[in-house]
Amino acid sequence: MDAEQVATEIGDFVIKHVLNQDATGCVIGLSGGIDSTTTASLVKRAFDRHNASPAAKQKLELVGYILPSNVNNPADAEDGIVVAKRLGIRYEVVPIQPVVDAFQKTNPEAFTAQYHAGNLMSRIRANILSTKAATEQKIIAGTGNKDEDYGIGYYTLFGDGAVHISPIGCLPKRLVREMAATLGWDDKFVHREPTAGLEEGQTDFKDLGYGYDVVELVTEGLRQGLSIDDLAVHPQVTQLLTQQAQRYAKLYGKPKFTAPIDAIKDVFRRHAIADSKAELLHPPVPDATLRYG
């Protein structure tokens, strides 16, 4: 990836969609994580370029909303504020726990399992963001990357997937990190452990049993026509899965998958779910110049 070229391509994509919808800019949810940090950086960079142009008929603005609940680490909200201040954007911290608690009256069934409570939080955040966007005549810039949203569908339908555009939906997690480093973010952000922030102590790696680099390898193999059996003996895939199984066992006592083929089948299964989700909700994704060897 030529990061500068792709950053410009993503920026052009964002500006095009904002102007086509006669919007005044974008709103974004800032979690302090690498995806929202990178997305916000790319959008702000694009808006700065647009606003500096003599041909610009209107100025475009990015607004960040930090939406913590009781299950979130307070440090995450603090990181979101750091991002907003560094980018020089208007931001607001809106604790969502009072709204979450109010749903005890209408949807008590959602609180019987943390999985459902977490997805409820995601949909509450989406409602807040979409209403902020509507009242400010802006559109929502989603923060999902290619591996999460289009690889395995690791998002809440009508929650964090409810966006107008998906600026980094063209980039696997590996290249999101590379883009963030190019944009000047330090290791604290670049190598932060991915988490959905919907359950206390949750991480994506703990949930999935493998990292997003596995998702990228397997889904790219799928795109190139390789089968599950092909991937199960591919040295690049098996070596990575073996390393990650060892890491998982070290962290949680035993690996989630006992054989590489089981993890590969899980990626395939989740990829099918991602496709079905995309049929219901499919925000536009920019074209990015990426080359695989």
Image (spheres, grey):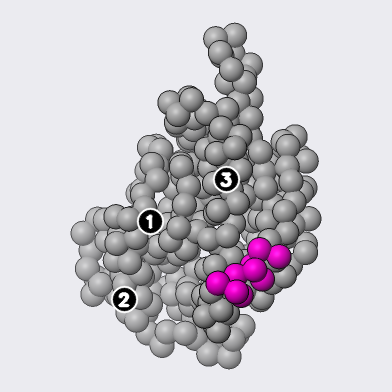
The residue tagged 1 is 150
Q: Residue at x 38, y 37 (%)?
A: 287
Q: Splitting the image into 4 quarters, where does residue 75 fall?
A: bottom right
> How many other residues sit within 10 Å of disc 2, few (<14), some (14-19) or many (≥20)?
some
Image depth: mark 3 or mark 2 in front: 3
How far apart marks 2 and 1 lie (CA) works out to 16 Å
Looking at the picture, which amino acid does disc 3 mark?
Thr
Q: Is residue 239 above or below residue 253?
A: above
Where in the figure is residue 238, as x and y percent of width and height? 38, 74
Where in the figure is residue 293, as x and y percent of width and height? 35, 49
Label 1 or label 3, whichever comes before in sequence order:
3
Looking at the picture, which amino acid does disc 1 mark?
Tyr
Q: Is residue 105 magenta?
A: yes
Q: Is residue 282 above or below residue 215?
A: above
Whether residue 194 is visible to the viewer of this picture, yes or no, is yes
The residue tagged 2 is 265
Where in the figure is residue 281, as x and y percent of width and height? 36, 53
Q: Secondary structure at mark 1?
A: helix
The residue tagged 3 is 131
Label 3 or label 2, whichever comes before in sequence order:
3
How far apart marks 3 and 2 lie (CA) works out to 39 Å
Where in the figure is residue 115, as x and y percent of width and height? 52, 77
Q: Residue at x 59, y 37 (%)?
A: 135
Disc number for residue 96: none
Q: Is residue 159 magenta?
A: no
Q: Specify start and end residues of the magenta stretch as a single range.
A: 98-106
Looking at the picture, which amino acid does disc 2 mark?
Lys
Q: Splitting the image into 4 quarters, where does residue 50 fall?
A: top right
Q: Residue at x 60, y 26 (%)?
A: 60
